[in-house]
Image (cartoon, helix red, strand yellow):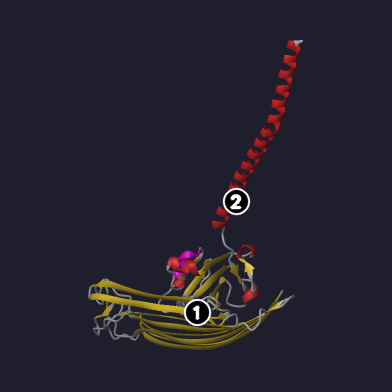
Amino acid sequence: MRNLMKSFVIGVAAFLVFVALVPFSATTAVAQEKAESTVAEKEVSQEKKLQKEYEIGTMTVTAQKRVENVQDVPASMSVFSDIQFEDADIRDIVDLVHFSPNMHMKIPGTDNMIVIRGISTFDMSKYSPVGFYVDDICFPVNYMQNPELFDIERIEVLKGPQRTLYGRNSESGVINIITKQPDNELREKIFGEYGNYDTSHGNIDSYRAGGSISGPIVRDKLYLGLSGQWEDSDGFMKNEYNDDDEAAEIDHINGRFTLRWTPTDRWDISFIADGVDTDDGIGYYRFESGMAETGRHRIAYDGPYQWEQEGNGQTLRVKYEGDAFNVLSVTGRRDFEDKHGGDLDCTPFALPWSANLILKNEIETGALRVCP
């Protein structure tokens, strides 16, 4: 009997111990599951954070005359942002073509001959097969198609025929330049640059400086943007015929003024005015042998070798965003003058092979665009 009672007591004790340990083991299992779940959530959160940090940002373009994500545009296109311009030190279209495939530029003297997919114009042709636009204003003459790039929002390079949307003179492609618009953010920038080039006739200094500032005049309503740059150098060539050491001089000045008004969330009105004035020497070509032979960094021209450009433009952009459609009106005027003279024989001899050309263009543009 005693043994029976002992066995009963041991059995009851074992049962009580089992009952007491079940909640503990269950609590331990739940705590372990929670810990594992917390670790998994942290890993997922960390992974999402890393994905966000390395996610490619959305690039908005207007290549098809409407605002779209570049990934949704079914066209062969290269797009360059303002950050890419600064990182690559892209200053003009000559620099830009080195970063866009199937694109090349020839400058035989004073022409700016842009080649896309092998389609080019010919030397001394006035018009280009590439449509060239700055803030939706056409630059049809090839002499105009190498502006200095400063305070730029982005550039879109479309490759292949674009006549459906852009009309004539766009057989090989289109280049769209979009300048920066002022907004509520105060942005300011200033830069300076000095260079020195050692030539056979002395050291040549070069200077480049510029800056931009933009921001609100009346917050959420009225904004102003100013930008400009200047470049100057005596150049690296000397004309021995008249002892002129500025045969390849550079003297550029550019400026832009932007006034933007947003009276409501639906209206966006901008007035853009810009100007350019350049005075360059184009005495580059020399003979390495023969009667007109000259040394390195030296020429002997008896004729002219200057290239001057003057231009100014005014653009009014009125944009309305409706519930069912958007409307954009672009009205612009551009006055441009190109004067250049060259000694075509590149010699000091009195030969009748010199040329002086003056090209004047006054362009007035108007467009009204309605899209869903």
Magenta: main secondary structure: helix
Which picture quadrant has residue 175? Answer: bottom right
Query: Mark 2 = which residue?
Result: 45
- Above or below, 310 relative to 6: below
Residue under the point 62% across and 62% down: 71
Q: Secondary structure at mark 2?
A: helix
Give the image location of residue 76, x and y in percent.
59, 64
Give the image location of residue 262, x and y in percent.
62, 82
Give the image location of residue 124, x and y in percent.
46, 80
Which picture quadrant has residue 325? Answer: bottom right
Q: In this image, 313 relative to 10: left or right?
A: left
Q: Please, what is the three-letter code of the amino acid marked with disc 1?
A: Ser
Check disc 1: other Cα within 10 Å, few if <14, some if 14-19, many if 20+.
many
Sequence-wise, the earlier of marks 2 and 1 is 2
Q: Secondary structure at mark 1?
A: strand
Residue stretch rendered in magenta on the structure: 95-100
Q: Is residue 160 magenta?
A: no
Res. 363 visible in picture: yes
**C-alpha gap between disc 2 and disc 1:** 38 Å
Q: Please, what is the three-letter code of the amino acid marked with disc 2?
A: Ser
Query: Mark 1 = which residue?
Result: 214
Res. 121 visible in picture: no
Give the image location of residue 157, x and y in percent.
55, 69
- Above or below, 354 relative to 197: below
Residue under the point 63% across and 38% down: 32
